[in-house]
Image: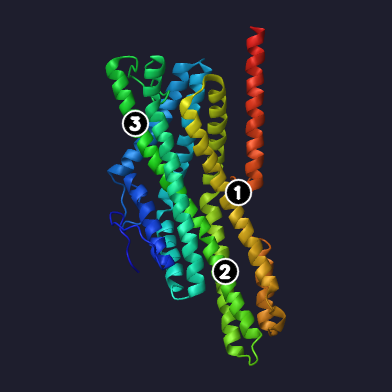
Amino acid sequence: MVQVKAKDTLPMRNFAKSYEMYDYNLLFIRWLADFCGVDMMVERYRFNYRTANCVTVLAFGVIASIYSVVFYYPDLFKICEVLIIFGFIVQGSVKFYYGFIHREFYKIQYGRLRRLHYKYRHNQKLNAKLLLLMERIHILSKFLTIVFHLTGLGYSIFPLYMYFAHGERVLMIAMRVPWIDADSNAGYIVTSFLQMVMIVIGCTGLSAADTVILLFVTNLIAYVDVFTDALDALNAMLNADVRDEWKIRRQVRKICTQHQDIIEYESDLDERYIMICFAQVIGSVIGMSGCLFLVYMVRFVPGYFILLTVFCQLLEFCLLGTVLTVKNEQIVEVIYSTNWYLLREPERRCFALMLHKSQNFSEMTIGGFAPLNLETFVSIMNRIYSFFMMLINFIEMDSYAA
């Protein structure tokens, strides 16, 4: 197997094979992960200084958030700004924790996916499908990374905007550091520097985490495409003028093995991402609700960038959950539409077992409480809007009473 190193460079060109595009995607993701010290593909990976920086930023964010809420109380607007960042810290902490403790699993899965793409490099039909899939994943990965860093840029230029437009000196993030007076010149510089480090590492780390999830979940499409192609080949064998029963039995065993691989892959996805999805939804709800409130009340400039980022994050996860559901339904359909009735009794029992297992498929959930799909996305958006309107009405009624 060809090793792809994080510090290697690949020229941007049109790839002819899907495994080459997979390597290019992996190289991009590893570059982001390596920046934060969480490149799990490194041989004999160890906790290093970049990993320590990432942990320090997360710990600093939690401590500073708690301190800032106490410091700004009862300023509701400043507390909302802090809670928005805290939502990102929550999802970032969960993603880092599960990525670190499952690092060996991810290393195995990276190799497993590459072998899948490499195996069908000479199959023109499958290679074309898998290559198109990898190209789309790469475009989406770049898009997510750009969106995250646009949010970081929005926070970075916010102090400049406030200074030149309103003559106010503000921090990039409404987050105070214990024992540092951000109102003094020296304290302002130190706090701004710490916040800039937090923004850079946070945007890069979240980009790496979300692109990894995108790569893993969408590659289920590759497994299903390979599975469908195998069933098409079986149909051709069954409809041939001269049947080769030995080849048919061998093909059925191959299909059963592929189906078992899909079930295991989906189960692994749900097990590794169940809490990540829960943290993502919680963080997204906090971030989007807070941003809508601040944008409406005080025209909070970074809020526009955050709304875009959080919207894309939540939509990404819900779309990935929908991909699992749709592909599972496709598996049931292609199994049922196969000419299984032309098989002998032992092979027919294998198909019956596959069909039974396919009807009880795994799906991505929000901590096991609700399915993660586009219907959930619409429901979450409706609830955020309802909560936002209720909060606005409460504040307006309070202001009229005063």
Q: Distance between the Cα atoms at labels 1 and 3?
A: 34 Å
Tell me the quarter of the image containing the N terminus.
Answer: bottom left
| Mark nearer the N terminus (1 vs 3) | 3
Please tell me whether mark 3 sits on a helix, a strand or a loop.
helix
Query: Residue 213: image x %, image y %?
Result: 48, 51
**Residue labelled with disc 1:** 365
Q: Amino acid at mark 1?
A: Thr
Q: Residue 137, percent across and down?
A: 47, 55
Badge 3: few (under 14), some or many (20 or more) residues near its Cα, within 10 Å?
A: some
Q: Residue furthest bottom?
A: 242
Q: Label 3: which residue?
A: 196
Q: Is residue 360 above or below residue 381?
A: below
Quick one: label 1 or label 2, which is nearer the N terminus?
Answer: 2
Answer with mark 3 or mark 2, whichever residue precedes in sequence: 3
Q: In screen coordinates, is 270 left or right of 200?
A: right
Residue beneath the point at 44% across and 26% down: 65
Q: How far, Cα to Cα, is label 3 from label 2?
A: 47 Å
In the displayed structure, does residue 101 sit left or right of residue 353? left
User: Hey, what amino acid is under mark 3?
Assistant: Met
- Answer whether residue 136 is visible to the viewer in this image: yes
Is residue 98 visible in the rendered image? The answer is: no
Gap between marks 1 and 2 measured at Cα: 21 Å
- Mark 2 surroundings: few (<14), some (14-19) or many (≥20) residues within 10 A: some
- Count up the numbered dots: 3
Image quarter hosting the C terminus? top right
